[in-house]
């Protein structure tokens, strides 16, 4: 199955350099809306020849992602639903802080950096677990529906969440997330299940 992972367009807090986490209200900028429109065109190309009835579009319920999904849905004439499981990593009291004001802290002894709940929010391990439960359920549903109508999955989410989802889909643990910077409005395509390793 093909899964297209989309990072939302640029938000007001991206411009300000603030940690967003699960803060719901930051909206898309004009550039963010243009990026979402471009994302829709990229998806249109990748979905060429695919019956729209075979595509399921699911978005994070945070405003910046939902606005991105709305633009994609309108451009491609697709319905979409929102799901809180696709939210960004919760960052607790760090949300809203300027990244330029933050200082590095040591990882507590005995933990991997992906297992620390920075700011009292979620660890990457928590996000991996949350997304894993969501993906197991939605992939099973799409596979069932593929016999009749649906076969492709488009998920509109956030930068860190996208990286964790990609790792899960590729069969990697929370400690094996590849921390590549995914620009706003990007589409990362993953084939699931992953090919068996040799």
Image (cartoon, rainbow, N blue to C red):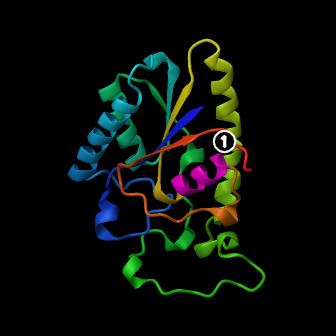
Badge 1 marks a residue whose secondary structure is helix
Q: Main secondary structure of the magenta part?
A: helix
Q: How many marks?
A: 1
Can you tell which quarter of the image residue 84 is in?
Answer: top right
* Position in image of residue 31 (x %, y %): 22, 52
Direction from residue 164 to residue 33 in the image, left or right: left
Can you tell which quarter of the image residue 96 is in?
Answer: bottom left
Q: What residue is at 62 percent from the left and 88 percent from the top?
A: 106
Looking at this view, is 167 or 74 the one in front?
Answer: 167
Looking at this view, is 187 or 101 the one in front?
Answer: 187
Q: With respect to residue 107, does 43 lie above or below? A: above
* Position in image of residue 135 (x %, y %): 65, 40
Q: Quick one: quadrant of the N terminus?
A: top right
Q: Residue furthest front?
A: 198
Q: What residue is at 62 percent from the left and 54 percent from the top?
A: 167
Direction from residue 41 to residue 171 in the image, left or right: right
* Position in image of residue 66 (x %, y %): 41, 41
Direction from residue 82 to residue 49 in the image, left or right: left
Looking at this view, is 112 or 48 the one in front?
Answer: 48
Task: Return the residue at label 1.
Answer: 134
Magenta-drawn segment: 161-170
Q: What residue is at 65 percent from the left and 75 percent from the top?
A: 113
Would residue 7 be counted in the magenta stretch? no
Would residue 166 be counted in the magenta stretch? yes
Can you tell which quarter of the image residue 44 is in?
Answer: top left
Give the crowd class for mark 1: few <14, some 14-19, many >=20 residues within 10 Å: some
* Position in image of residue 126 (x %, y %): 69, 60
Q: What residue is at 51 percent from the left and 58 percent from the top?
A: 22
């Amino acid at each position: 199955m093909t899964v297209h992972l989309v990072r939302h367009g640029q938000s007001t807090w991206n411009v300000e350099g603030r940690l967003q986490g699960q803060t719901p209200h930051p909206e898309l900028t004009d550039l963010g809306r243009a990026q979402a429109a471009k994302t829709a065109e990229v998806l249109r190309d990748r979905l060429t020849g695919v019956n729209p009835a075979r595509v399921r579009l699911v978005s994070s319920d945070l405003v910046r992602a939902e606005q991105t999904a709305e633009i994609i849905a309108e451009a491609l004439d697709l319905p979409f639903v929102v799901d809180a499981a696709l939210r960004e990593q919760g960052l607790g009291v760090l949300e809203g802080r300027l990244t330029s004001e933050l200082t590095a802290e040591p990882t507590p002894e005995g933990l991997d950096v992906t297992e620390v709940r920075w700011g009292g929010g979620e660890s990457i391990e928590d996000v991996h677990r949350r997304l894993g439960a969501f993906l197991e359920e939605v992939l099973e549903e799409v596979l069932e529906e593929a016999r009749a109508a649906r076969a492709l999955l488009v998920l509109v989410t956030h930068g860190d969440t996208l990286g964790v989802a990609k790792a899960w889909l590729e069969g990697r643990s929370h400690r094996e997330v590849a921390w590549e910077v995914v620009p706003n409005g990007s589409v990362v395509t993953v084939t699931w299940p992953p090919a068996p390793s040799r």
